[in-house]
């Protein structure tokens, strides 16, 4: 057993030490204390493994006292995995090489493991090596911590890799440093691709500004966490809605090092929310804002405009004769037409304007920035033009037009309800003017709307008082240049307003069903006139009478006509009823029966205003008709409009093939006359020859007596 008086600790940590214990005597006591009280485990072991010296820390750590050393062998204390290594190191020491620091594992007395790190050197006695001195430090605690750290990192990695949430790590400038599989999958990129990208590359364009703002705020305030909802763009361009919680990490100087965004897929929820919003605020057919959203916007616009003392316009639109489309062509076609109308209207407008569908064929437009009142008619005209382009609805082309009413805030109404009502009234005024036109609301128009109601009452009075009368317009046979017939046209001799043309009162008469007694009155008058002319000896010619759709569909219409023929004694062969194509198309089967009955009575049938409705000639093929009257709207512009010329030509050709006579209406000029004369048309009618005249005047000027 050694009594250590002095220890020389020179070079011990270099592992070279030749004079670790120089002498047991002759050194200083302080060294012995130093070694004894050191926090390192210090030991001296003989070459045979015998323990020569251990310090206090060694004893405390390994649980052996110095008294136990006698029977102990160093290699019994060392975990066997380290034996070989230890032997090799000793060999190297003996060979005069140095041995770097290394780790060993001890077994304590009660069976625990101690991991120690340190170095060894030769132990010399009298200059002769007789053992190994070692200085080790217990690093078990550090090792444990390291291991724990390692496994926590592993755990984190597992969470990172398998998390259903998308997790990424971004550099402060937004470059991707890391992204887990979920993150990659959400956005449709591989990590390799994301590595080359910035977060703004996968952010929805509308959310980029917000994203950058959030980043700036986070960096400026050193705020650690942000939670928000955000849109990303997937690789395929689709939108990905995420709930984002982003955490920022800063270094000791407060500089951002990286940020960890964690995203969760909320696309489904967002879509559902959007759908709910759409259902509540958008029209499901056209996708336009519905009445609720329109009301909101109208109020909003009004509030904004009021604040800046501005003005804005409200347009109320209604498709002309849309009911006809729905009734004759079915709802699917009607729906398709509404969708196309919605598209066209949207295309006419600017970003700040709102177009909404109120229901049916009614649309409204809030025009917020038209700059100058003078632009409004231009906008309205553009809309009318767009809406009167043919609608190609797959199965067929449909012609439409629109009536537009315009009210101005604040002049025409200072609250939403008033403004809307007045735009609506203006729209009705436009309809009254024949549709396909626009009207401004104004005090004067308001007065006119009120007078509509007066008009109905006074129309009834006038019927009783026989204040209606009939004019006749001659129709010229193109072959003989003689009168082929006349068309009876109704006029209203208003006691105060003078003569009112039929376009101004017939729609109202139809609306109020006054057309039934009025139409019957016309028929009776015309029949009587025929008999009268016949009695006066005029050569037989045809007399055309307009029959309103309302009249034509009355179940007792044919019966009424029979009675009138009986009562007046008129010759049915001289009569020609003019009905518009839409009347026939509305209910073809019923129309065929009525037409058949009229034909059996000997009455001729003509289709009036041909070309303005929705039917094609082939639809009319099987109907008992005699004549087609090409509408004057195709004639007006004949000389300048190649389309119109083509339509007129084609219509004449096809009518001929169906064995129908053709009358062209509205011929006003030499040129128009020249055009139709060269075509295979039978009869012309128009101001070029004569305006409608009284029965006497037409007889005096145009009718021929048998000589
Ligand atoms: P419509 O059946 O198309 O009648 C022809 C209209 O064209 C008439 O207008 C006639 O005056 C006008 N017209 C004739 N030649 C020319 C021309 O060269 N240039 C122009 N610009 N116009 C021409 P009117 O008399 O004002 O009648 C308008 C419409 O009122 C008629 O159109 C018809 O639909 C309806 N109507 C007239 N009388 C009756 C009636 O007794 N019963 C019914 N139900 N409707 C009638
Ligand atoms: Ca007519
Ligand atoms: Ca006509």
Image (tube, rainbow, N blue to C red):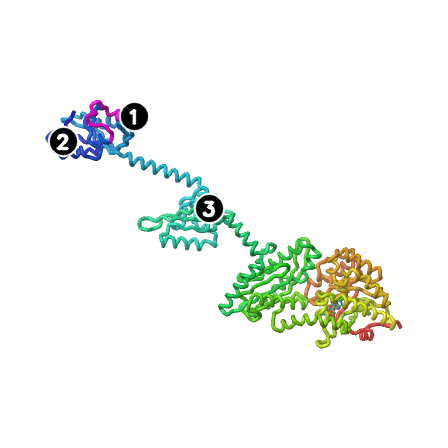
Magenta residue span: 61-85
> Which image quadrant for residue 533?
bottom right
Q: Mark 3 or mark 1, which is nearer to you?
A: 3
Q: Earlier in the sequence, mark 1 or mark 2?
A: 2
- Judged from the image, the secondary structure of the residue bearing numbered disc 3 is strand
Disc 3 crowd, CA 10 A, few/some/many (<14, 14-19, 20+) = some
Q: Earlier in the sequence, mark 3 or mark 1?
A: 1
Q: Nearer the viewer, residue 106 or 112?
A: 112
C-alpha span from label 3 to label 1: 52 Å
C-alpha span from label 1 to label 2: 33 Å
Q: Nearer the viewer, residue 261 or 188?
A: 261
Identify the mark at residue 643; answer none if there is no mark: none
Q: Position of residue 389 (x, y in %)?
A: 65, 61
The reply to whether the magenta stretch includes residue 101 is no
Q: Which residue is mark 3?
A: 264
Q: What residue sits 82% from the left and 64% below the top? A: 561
């Amino acid at each position: 057993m050694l009594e250590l008086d002095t220890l020389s600790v020179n070079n011990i940590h270099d592992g070279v030490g030749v004079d670790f214990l120089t002498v047991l005597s002759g050194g200083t006591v302080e060294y012995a204390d130093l070694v004894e009280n050191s926090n390192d485990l210090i030991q001296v072991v003989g070459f045979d493994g015998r323990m020569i010296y251990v310090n206090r820390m060694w004893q405390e750590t390994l649980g052996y006292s110095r008294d136990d050393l006698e029977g102990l062998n160093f290699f019994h204390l060392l975990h066997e995995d380290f034996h070989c290594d230890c032997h090799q190191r000793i060999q190297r020491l003996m060979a005069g090489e140095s041995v770097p620091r290394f780790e060993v594992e001890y077994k304590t007395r009660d069976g625990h493991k101690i991991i120690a790190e340190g170095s060894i050197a030769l132990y010399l006695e009298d200059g002769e090596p007789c053992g190994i001195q070692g200085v080790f430090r217990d690093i078990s605690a550090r090792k444990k911590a390291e291991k724990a750290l390692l496994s926590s990192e592993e755990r984190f990695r597992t969470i990172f890799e398998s998390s259903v949430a998308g997790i990424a790590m971004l550099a402060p400038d937004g470059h991707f440093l890391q992204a887990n599989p979920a993150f990659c999958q959400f956005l449709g990129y591989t990590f390799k691709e994301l590595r080359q990208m910035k977060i703004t590359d996968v952010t929805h364009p509308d959310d980029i500004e917000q994203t950058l703002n959030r980043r700036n705020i986070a960096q400026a305030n050193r705020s650690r966490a942000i939670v928000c909802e955000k849109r990303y763009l997937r690789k395929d361009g689709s939108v990905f809605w995420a709930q984002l919680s982003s955490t920022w990490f800063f270094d000791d100087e407060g500089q951002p090092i990286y940020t960890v965004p964690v995203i969760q897929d909320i696309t489904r929820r967002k879509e559902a929310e959007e759908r709910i919003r759409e259902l509540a605020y958008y029209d499901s057919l056209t996708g336009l804002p519905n009445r609720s959203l329109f009301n909101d916007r109208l109020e909003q616009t009004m509030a904004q405009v009021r604040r800046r003392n501005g003005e804005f316009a409200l347009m109320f639109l209604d498709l002309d004769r849309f009911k006809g489309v729905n009734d004759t062509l079915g709802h699917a076609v009607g729906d398709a037409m509404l969708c196309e109308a919605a598209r066209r209207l949207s295309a006419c407008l600017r970003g700040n304007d709102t177009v909404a569908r109120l229901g049916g064929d009614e649309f409204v437009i809030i025009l917020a920035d038209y700059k100058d009142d003078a632009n409004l008619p231009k906008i309205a005209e553009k809309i009318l033009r767009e809406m009167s382009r043919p609608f190609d609805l797959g199965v067929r082309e449909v012609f439409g037009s629109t009536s537009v009413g315009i009210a101005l805030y604040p002049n025409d109404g200072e609250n939403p309800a008033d403004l809307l009502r007045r735009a609506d009234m203006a729209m009705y005024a436009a309809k009254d003017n024949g549709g396909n036109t626009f009207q401004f609301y104004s005090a004067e128009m308001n007065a006119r709307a009120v007078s509509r109601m007066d008009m109905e009452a006074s129309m009834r009075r006038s019927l009783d008082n026989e204040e209606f009368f009939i004019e006749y317009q001659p129709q010229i046979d193109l072959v003989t240049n003689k009168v082929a017939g006349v068309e009876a046209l109704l006029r209203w001799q208003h006691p105060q307003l003078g003569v009112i043309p039929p376009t101004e009162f017939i729609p109202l008469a139809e609306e109020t069903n006054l057309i039934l007694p009025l139409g019957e009155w016309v028929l009776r008058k015309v029949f009587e006139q025929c008999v009268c002319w016949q009695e006066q000896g005029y050569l037989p010619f045809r007399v055309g009478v307009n029959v309103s759709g309302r009249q034509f569909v009355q179940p007792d219409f044919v019966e009424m006509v029979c009675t009138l023929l009986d009562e007046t004694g008129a010759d049915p062969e001289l009569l020609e009823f003019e009905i518009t194509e839409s009347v026939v198309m509305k209910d073809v089967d019923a129309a065929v029966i009525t037409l058949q009955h009229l034909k059996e009575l000997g009455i001729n049938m003509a289709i009036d205003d041909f070309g303005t409705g929705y039917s094609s000639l082939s639809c009319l093929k099987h109907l008992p008709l005699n004549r087609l009257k090409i509408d004057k709207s195709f004639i007006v512009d004949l000389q300048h409009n190649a389309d119109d010329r083509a339509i007129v030509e084609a219509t004449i050709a096809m009518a001929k093939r169906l064995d129908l006579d053709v009358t062209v209406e509205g011929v006003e000029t030499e040129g128009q006359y020249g055009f139709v004369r060269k075509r295979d048309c039978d009869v012309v009618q128009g101001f070029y020859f004569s305006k409608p005249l009284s029965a006497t005047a037409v007889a005096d000027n145009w009718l021929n007596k048998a000589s």
